[in-house]
Amino acid sequence: MSGNTETHYGYDALGRRIRKATYGRHTGHTARSRTDFVWEGFRLLQENVQQQGWRTYLYDAEQPYTPVASVTGKGESRQVWYYHTDVTGTPQEVTAADGTLVWAGYIRGFGENAADISNSGAYFHQPLRLPGQYFDDETGLHYNLFRYYAPECGRFVSQDPIGLKGGINLYQYAPNPLSWIDPLGLTTEEITLKPGEILVNPKDVNFSQTTINSAFDTPDGKRSVQSVINDVRKGNIKATDFPAIKVVNVKGQLVVRDSRLAIAVKGKAQQIKVILETNVDQLRDFTKRLRNNGLPNTGTSKTPTCK
């Protein structure tokens, strides 16, 4: 709420914001402005800004939260806008197809935009900030998927959903914004990850089962789980080299059903790659498995035993 206006946000079942609408406080239910959002997993794919139309975002294949272009209009009126970013994937300039500068920002280390510049003098809609963040002009905050971020102080406005398990600084964005990003508002990650993948501490993820198989599949055939754990402890195998594990986010608590997590925990690994499960059928199956194992939706922190 600001002055004579108030803005309402709407979210889907996965916690993604799908609309925002601003109303006059004394003008009934007619929105002064409205924006609808379409998501590709946990990455913004499209937005429809009232009286401006749809905008589709395209991202770098290697840096999944780095925008490379956006497309507006259709048919002969279609236009492509090109994004020029810094090393973290934060937009610094946007140009038209002919190279004309349409937007430039002076975005500081923790995401604060000190100036908007346009050669043409015309307004250009450019809300993307630090990777995964969307600027809300009605609040001055950045929408960061699972939390909101205050760029002026370089902190989130709400605590880490997993509490002190994420560290003693409950509002921290990243230890170094020049080499780390946090596109989901959950945990920092290094830049070199595949689309949708994030790095987490294995100890922050709960299990959805109480036992695991004693054999582990590798490219060279089956091995005992204990032998793989020993190699992780010795540094012969990096847990971050495992394919990303699919996890479910239950009110901020990540839960997984995979022996790789047990190996990472027992091998004392500091990080492991995960990817959030968004398939509705898989989410239902996951909940069913938890019930069958006699566990709550948030799983258990107790490491499974080999059978």
Image: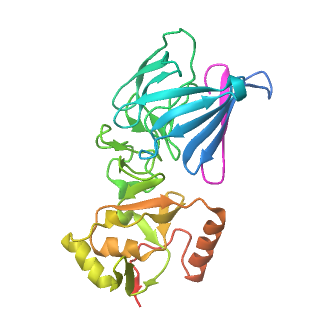
Q: Is residue 198 magenta?
A: no
Q: Which residues are magenta?
A: 1-20
Residue at the left extreme of this rendering? 234
User: Left of 99 or right of it: where is 80?
Assistant: right
Task: Tell me residue 6's x, y (percent).
Answer: 66, 27
Residue at 43% over, 53% down: 194
**Relative to residue 263, is residue 92 depicted above or below?**
above
User: Left of 32 or right of it: where is 64?
Assistant: left
Name the image quarter holding residue 86.
Answer: top left
Task: Tell me residue 291's x, y (percent).
Answer: 60, 78
In this view of the protein, which residue sits in the foreground, 89 or 96?
96
User: Left of 36 or right of it: where is 275?
Assistant: left
Name the image quarter holding residue 33.
Answer: top right
Image quadrant where one finds the N terminus: top right
Q: How is the image coloured?
A: rainbow
In this view of the protein, which residue sits in the foreground, 190 or 268?
190
Image quadrant where one finds the C terminus: bottom left
Task: Tell me residue 219's x, y (percent).
Answer: 36, 76
- Residue 22 visible in rendering: no
- Residue 235 visible in rendering: yes
Residue at 61% over, 54% down: 14
**Relative to residue 152, is residue 256 depicted above or below?**
below
Residue at 48% over, 23% down: 94
Name the image quarter holding residue 164.
Answer: bottom left
